[in-house]
Amino acid sequence: MRRFFLGLLLVALLFGTPYAALILNRAMGPWNATAVERDGSTTAMQFDPDLPPADFVPIFPGARVVQSSRVVAKDAPSGVGFLELAVHASAAEVRDFYRSRLEATGFTVDDYGTMGLNPAAAAYLGVDGTLAGKRPATDDVVVIQIRDEEGILLRTRLLQLQWRKLSEWPAGQPKP
């Protein structure tokens, strides 16, 4: 077990944490959990790198799936999907790909940049950009967080995608 974790540390340094997380998630395998909320309702969570994304969520070419998950709760009965991808591309290439693919399927895409973070805070948090696509006709929203590159031998960037129904956006949170 110790060798496994030392190997993960080496992979993280040489190829970036997305690859270390990919290996760890594959080793753990798929799993489910149920949470009981304070009002007595339940939240079902499913984690599996092989979960398919929603049909309107494009996958960056050559990306490797780090993890995929789905959460269904009382406040989000349609579910919230999450997908983490390891890619080898610049932030501009990622931004252009997702903007063009989402706009081609009827989404309005907003580029939030580093969401008001100053350059030092964005670098510290590893944030390289954020896009949000809305399609009111189908009540869909997709948020893409673009992370900084990492890794010594192979530069890798983590993309974190989230999708849900816009009408099920959390109360009190600003909508994209």
Image (tube, rainbow, N blue to C red):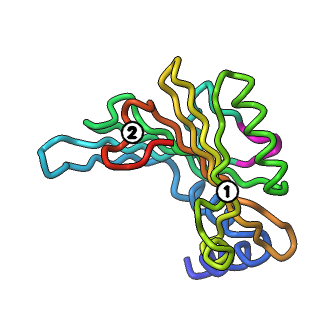
Which secondary structure, mark 2? loop
Q: How far across and down, in percent of the image, does residue 58 sit?
A: 70, 33
Looking at the rendered structure, the secondary structure element under dot 1 is strand
What's the mark number on residue 113?
A: 1
Which label was assigned to residue 72? none
Q: Earlier in the sequence, mark 1 or mark 2?
A: 1
Q: Main secondary structure of the magenta part?
A: loop
Amino acid carrying label 1: it is Gly
Which segment did they paint magenta? Answer: 59-64
Q: Residue at x 19, y 49 (%)?
A: 37
Counting from the top left corner in percent of width and height, residue 138 is at 51, 19
Q: Position of residue 80 (x, y in %)?
A: 44, 38
Q: Using the image, determine if residue 150 lies above or below residue 166.
A: below
Residue drawn where x is 64% and y is 31% of the image: 108
In the visual, does 86 lie left or right of 117? right
What label does residue 169 carry, if any? 2
State left or right for residue 35 relative to residue 15: left
Q: Quadrant of the N terminus?
A: bottom right
Q: Nearer the viewer, residue 84 or 6?
A: 84
Residue 63 magenta-highlighted: yes
> How packed is label 2: few (under 14 Cα within 10 Å), some, or many (20 or more)?
some
Query: Within the image, what quadrant is residue 75 found in?
Result: top left
Q: Position of residue 90 (x, y in %)?
A: 84, 57
Identify the residue at the far top of this view: 137
In the image: residue 130, left or right of residue 64: left
Height in image: 13 above or below 76?
Answer: below
- At label 1, counting other C-alpha atoms closer than 10 Å, the crowd grade (few under 14, some 14-19, many 20 or more) is some
Q: Which image quadrant for residue 11? A: bottom right
Q: Residue furthest left?
A: 39
Q: Nearer the viewer, residue 1 or 87?
A: 87
What amino acid type is highlighted by mark number 2? Answer: Trp
